[in-house]
Amino acid sequence: MDLILWRHAEAEQGIPDLQRALTPKGVKQARRMAEWLDSQLPEGCKILVSPAVRTLQTVEPLGRKYKVVPQLGPGASPEEVLRAANWPHSKETVMIVGHQPTLGQVAAMLIAGQDQDWEMKKASAWWIVQRERQDPDSVYLKAVMTPELIVK
């Protein structure tokens, strides 16, 4: 199974948390990452998004259908993210657009097999693959991309 974790782009500070919008820099980050992701993702990729405004604004430039999943909101647990993605049983590639620290915790759990708080930069995407569905040792990191690394 392929799982892509995409952290939302830079957002404004403020309350209520779910209403925080992207900054102008965040809009640019989201656009750049969306272009790169669109060139890499398979057509049938299932895209699941937190209900926060900043995640919705991050995924919109991708121009693909997505599903808002309330369980992916700020404060979600790594287990909730993996359950929403149907890890490792999904037959299709799944992308989660969500938040820190949860996405970093998911990456650590899958790649290192440990509960750790790994930092994911804003707007970055981590592509994780499990080759054999029943073999956690077959998990590997296929790619990590940040907007700054994308050459236009």
Image (cartoon, rainbow, N blue to C red):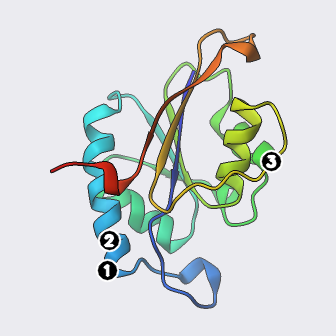
Per the image, the residue denoted by label 1 is 24
Q: Which amino acid does the dot numbered 1 rest on?
A: Pro
Horizontal and vertical percent position of residue 30: 35, 61
Q: Which amino acid does the dot numbered 2 rest on?
A: Val
Task: Return the mark for residue 116.
Answer: 3
Is label 3 or label 1 in front? 3
Residue drawn 66% across and 56% down?
Answer: 72
Horizontal and vertical percent position of residue 57: 40, 68
**Secondary-structure class at tag 1:** helix
CB under 8 Å between callouts 2 and 1? yes
The quadrant in which residue 16 appears is: bottom right
**Secondary-structure class at tag 3:** loop
Whole-number angstrom distance, CA of label 2 to CA of label 1: 5 Å
| Res 63 visible | no
Q: Toward the viewer: 17 or 145?
A: 145
CB under 8 Å between callouts 3 and 1? no
Residue drawn 27% across and 60% down?
Answer: 31
**Secondary-structure class at tag 2:** helix
Per the image, the residue denoted by label 2 is 27
Q: Dot 2 surroundings within 10 Å: few (below 14), some, or many (20 or more)?
A: some
Q: Is residue 103 left or right of residue 23?
A: right
Residue drawn 45% across and 80% down?
Answer: 21
Task: Return the mark for residue 51.
Answer: none
- Tell me if residue 113 comes above or below residue 66 in the rendering: above
Is label 3 or label 2 in front? 3
Q: Which amino acid does the dot numbered 3 rest on?
A: Gln
Horizontal and vertical percent position of residue 150: 27, 49
Q: Toward the viewer: 68 or 82?
A: 82
